[in-house]
Amino acid sequence: MPDAYRIDVNVSPEYLPEKSAPNVAQYLFAYHITITNVGSVAAQLVSRHWLITDANEQVEEVKGEGVVGKQPWLSPGDSFEYSSFCILDTSVGTMQGSYQMAAEDGTTFEVKIPEFMLAVPGALH
């Protein structure tokens, strides 16, 4: 995809011990995402696709419109930030995925969300 359609994604995951219940295998992780249009064409985030994998290699696929109920438009230089969460059955897992975008010129394109780790502090040696 040409640089005109470049979108950067920054992810910051966080374990939430106060909302987790390890005794019943429920580990809640928040993730904070910043999406920045570093290209030269305005684009709208239309939908998302996530693959969430726990340490038992169980994969949950999540697809849907927008993020947190929104389908933000990003002009060049604009950023959109949001937070969401997932619950894993294990203390370690990963997330990866993509956003489907529609540029103002009619071009549709996919933005990859690189894999990131979800881990209870101390779970990885």
Image: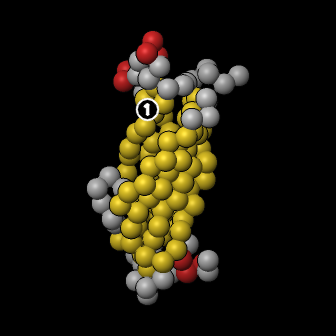
Looking at the figure, which quarter contains the N terminus? bottom right
The one nearer the camera, 91 or 43, is 91
- Considering only vertical position in the picture, is 49 above or below 75? above
**Pointer 1: residues within 10 angstroms few (<14), some, or many (20+)?**
some
Q: Is residue 3 visible?
A: yes
Is residue 81 placed above or below 78 in the rendered structure?
above
Q: Residue at x 47, y 19 (%)?
A: 25
In the picture, measured across the screen, residue 17 lies left or right of residue 96, that is left
Residue under numbered circle 1: 87
- The extreme bottom residue here reads 105
- Going by the numbered disc 1, the residue's amino acid type is Ile
- Where disc 1 sits, the SS reads strand
- Which residue lies most toward the right here? 125
Give the percent coordinates (x, y) of residue 106. 43, 85
- Kindly identify the residue that appears in the image at 45 percent across and 42 percent down: 31
Image vertical order of residue 53 relative to residue 96, above or below: above
User: Which residue is most to the top?
Assistant: 23
Quadrant assignment, res 34:
bottom left
Percent x, y of residue 75: 40, 75
Quadrant housing the C terminus: top right
Quadrant of residue 16 within the rendered picture: top left
Residue 113, quarter of the rendered image: bottom right
- Residue occupying the point 40% across, 67% down: 45
